[in-house]
Image (tube, rainbow, N blue to C red):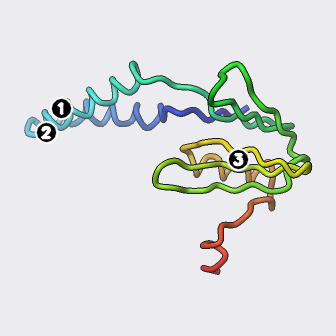
Amino acid sequence: MKTIHVKPTPALAIMLVMGVALMVMKSYMLLAGLAMVLLALFALTVMPDRNLCSFCPEYLVLYNCRDKAECMVIYWEDIVNWQYEWSPVVDRFAVTLVDGHTEIQEVYAKGRIQRAMNHYAPGKEKKSKMKQAGK
């Protein structure tokens, strides 16, 4: 099972290591490295994290934003199409089901979601109007 979280933990860990490396290797980069380390430590320890969605071989799980005890299980065969909608404010992951219902989830990981959806639901991506015009 692959789970996508709100907090980008691998990127923050890389930022922490790079900050320490800057502090140790270049004395004139001490303040920049210290700022990177402090920011990464703050994000890793203080900022909250939660699951957005999980990809399993049989189904997709979308976690509810309002009630953390609830989730929605969507079987791959129930998906008609899906779309990743980018916006400057918040990105949305929309899944249209065979019953006509569309489930929309706020997400922040376009590459990981596209790879997983193309793996589990190939050929079901709904292209945006801008992508179709560019073809």
Q: What secondary structure is found at the residue carrying circle 3?
A: helix
User: Which x, y percent locates residue 131?
Assistant: 62, 72
Q: Quadrant of residue 1?
A: top right
Question: Residue 110 shows which numbered tag?
Answer: none
Q: Which residue is mark 2?
A: 29
Q: Quadrant of residue 67?
A: top right
User: Which x, y percent locates residue 83?
Assistant: 69, 56
Q: Amino acid at mark 2?
A: Met
User: Which x, y percent locates residue 3?
Assistant: 66, 33
Say whether residue 25 is left or right of residue 69.
left
Q: Nearer the viewer, residue 108 or 114?
A: 108
Mark 1 Cα-neighbour bin, 10 Å: few <14, some 14–19, many ≥20? many
Q: Which residue is mark 3?
A: 116
Q: Which residue is mark 1?
A: 23
Q: Nearer the viewer, mark 1 or mark 3?
A: 3
Q: CA distance from mark 1 to mark 2?
A: 6 Å
- In this picture, is 122 found above or below 51? below
* Image point (83%, 48%), residue name: 101
Say whether residue 131 is left or right of residue 121.
left
Say whether residue 86 is left or right of residue 59.
left
Q: Quadrant of the C terminus?
A: bottom right
Q: Nearer the viewer, residue 112 or 94?
A: 94
Q: What secondary structure is found at the residue carrying circle 1?
A: helix
Q: Nearer the viewer, residue 29 or 44?
A: 44
Q: Earlier in the sequence, mark 1 or mark 2?
A: 1
